[in-house]
Image (spheres, rainbow, N blue to C red):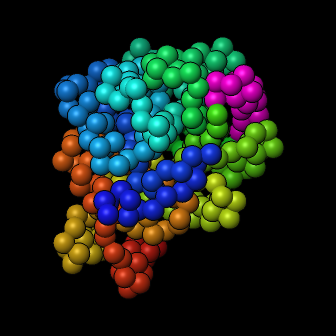
Amino acid sequence: MSSVNKSGTFKLGDRIVKRLGYGAMQLAGPGVFGPPRHPDQATAVLREAVHLGINHIDTADFYGPHVTNQIIREALHPYRDDLVLVTKVGALRGADGSWNRAFSRQELTQAVHDNLRNLGLDVLDVVNLRAMFDVHGPAEGSIEAPLTILADLQRQGLVRHIGLSNVTAAQIDEGRRIAPIVCVQNHYNLVQRADDSLIDDLARQGIAYVPFFPLGGFTPLQSSTLSDVAGRLGATPMQVALAWLLRRATNILLIPGTSSVAHLRENLAAGQLVLSPQTLAELNAIAS
């Protein structure tokens, strides 16, 4: 059985996906802006991901902008029947590479159509509304207006399912009164544990939780305990961090990103790691 299959599955909307997926953000240029330095490598990573059994790819048309979705289409279109492409709206990139909130009806409608066009789709499987009240993390603020617009686009048949990104528990509750929410995508990893109780609440409701920056983001996770555990297991610290997330809750779907085929294979090997109760206890203690 492959590493991807060993990770298990979870229902995302009306589709069953492997819990080990792929995040496409790193396929764009430096700073997630402009084209990649090596387009052929970007294409190769995507094709290898699907070849190895991944059927959940996370993307956004504001990566690049447009670049990442265009690479996905070039590499994988026509798409395999079981492949689920999840995208995001709610942000725009400035000419200087800045990240700006885009919540108006015109901006959200344009974003959905941009994703459809650049991915080569008639309908988007899952669209996450990314709350941009604070680019550094969730911040309170009503999402009723933009989510109502996205729900309108869903009723028009352009979007199958809706998720939320960079949100608080209160915003999730508000969102669920407007439209069914199939997934939540927030910053979470072995060290960043603010969403512990939220993950458990979502699991009871059958809602997927998709941690972004599962390996620490632009500053990789650093921990002597993590390194010690990895050494004992004959694995890398990042593989252990991914294996811990798979054990943390069955509703967690992983989307580690990379622009390297070798690194992709290394990430996916985390699905084969076995963590004993003692090892899990050691890893759980890192956050405290």
Q: Quadrant of residue 72?
A: top left
- Image x and y of residue 88, in percent: 54, 32
Within the magenta stretch, is there residue 118?
no
Within the magenta stretch, is there residue 155?
yes
Residue positioned 68% across, 65% down in the render = 204
The one nearer the camera, 191 or 7, is 7
Residue positioned 21% across, 43% down in the render = 261
- Image x and y of residue 276, in percent: 37, 82
- Image x and y of residue 42, in percent: 25, 31
Q: Is residue 118 left or right of residue 111?
A: left
Q: Residue furthest bottom?
A: 278
The one nearer the camera, 185 or 270, is 270
Q: Residue furthest right?
A: 177
For the N terminus, which image quadrant? bottom left
**Magenta-colored span:** 141-159
Q: Is residue 268 left or right of residue 86?
A: left
Is residue 257 visible to us here?
A: yes
Q: Is residue 257 above or below residue 43?
A: below
